[in-house]
Image (cartoon, rainbow, N blue to C red):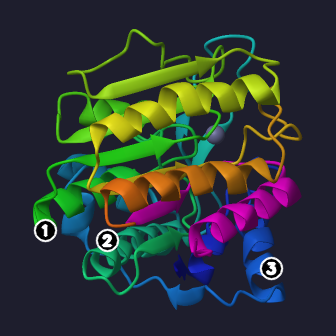
Amino acid sequence: MLCFYHPLCEAHDPGSDHSENMRRLGAIHKLLRSQDWPFLKLIEMPVGRREMIELVHTKEYVDFVFKSVPASGYKEIEINEVISDHDDGEVTVLSPQSGAALMRCVGGVVAAVDSVMSNVDTKAFCATRPPGHHALANKAMGFCVFNHAAIAARYAQKTYGIDKIAIVDFDVHHANGTQKIFEKDSGVFHASIHQLPLWPETGYAHETGCGNLLNVPIAPNTSRDEWLCAWREKILSRVDSEKPKLIIVSAGFDAHKGEPKSRQNLETKDFYTITRDLVALANKHSGGRVISILEGGYNIQLAAESCMEHLRGLGEKY
Ligand SMILES: [Zn+2]
């Protein structure tokens, strides 16, 4: 299993009191360094190219992002709209290293697609930061600037002609950006399991796109067993029937019971189980190919430990 990472992704700095702070990825990097990972190969993310970003995002928006990167301090590029009393209205911020971090994220996910499609390995994880699944084609949202999962999917379509990709998102927040980007693209099936009500207050079951979207909203304070039951009976069964030729995972760890931004009850070990579920489907349909991309998770230690369970689930052989 390949693990794409880069120190610059840790250097994107919205401020130490921001939920999406540098310590999130720092904790993941620390566990990666401190544990023995016989099945994991660490690879530095290469620098991406602008045309990769423009597979998903408008030229004007890409210009706006790179022109907004400040020489010092912070630059707010979006304030999360407070839609309900579940929302905290935190800002999406760029700092001096953000442009370089974003270029590594883009280069990393594209390199992951190339590696998996050329059978260097069938599994790859990308330790991207900032997260990406809320980003729209022309707008930052929810700490997300570029939509890395969408870039990976578009690149895989364009470069390798894959006609059925599944993006599976288990972050506790609905992947509104990924949904919007693909809602008219029958070549991408997008499945999201998330809490509602919760920001961004989208992702209801009736949102089905062109038949290519599956939204599984979960009520606050749902038990762990009920969450896992919905995962199996709705998400896994549908992904199975879609027979994807590549599975891309938007891996957020904020449905954990210790997460400050949500009210779910998953435990650290559950991220191993649900990853094994996806690997089993990949073995059945997609030659074992899975590319996982880091999204949210704001209890820094628990998210990092959950991420390690996810990596173990991806990397261990049957
Ligand atoms: Zn999230």
Q: Is residue 75 above or below residue 36?
A: above
> On the picture, is 110 further left or further right than 10?
left
In the foreground, 13 or 230: 230
Q: Is residue 71 above or below residue 64?
A: below
> Can the viewer see residue 113 in this picture?
yes
**Residue 94 percent location from the top left of the image:** 55, 57
Give the secondary structure at mark 2. helix
- 65 in magenta: no
Q: Quadrant of residue 33?
A: bottom right
**Residue 55 percent location from the top left of the image:** 19, 56
Q: Are marks 1 and 2 in contact (CB under 8 Å)?
A: yes
Q: How far is mark 1 from mark 2, CA to CA?
A: 9 Å
User: Residue flagged by tag 3: what amino acid is it?
Assistant: Lys
> Can the viewer see residue 175 in this picture?
no
Q: Residue at 46%, 43% (x, y): give it.
A: 168
Q: Give the residue at mark 1.
A: 159
State the extent of the magenta-drawn residues as a range. 289-318
User: Residue flagged by tag 1: what amino acid is it?
Assistant: Thr
Mark drawn on residue 30: 3
Q: Residue at 44%, 75% (x, y): give it.
A: 104
Q: How far is mark 3 from mark 2, CA to CA?
A: 25 Å
> On the picture, is 268 further left or further right than 167?
right
Give the secondary structure at mark 1. helix
Q: Residue at 33%, 50% (x, y): give it.
A: 150
Q: Is residue 165 above or below residue 88?
A: below
> On the picture, is 285 further left or further right than 81?
left
Q: Give the residue at mark 2.
A: 113
Q: Quadrant of the C terminus?
A: bottom right
User: Residue flagged by tag 2: what amino acid is it?
Assistant: Val
- 296 in magenta: yes
N-terminal of the pair, mark 1 or mark 3, is 3
Give the secondary structure at mark 3. helix
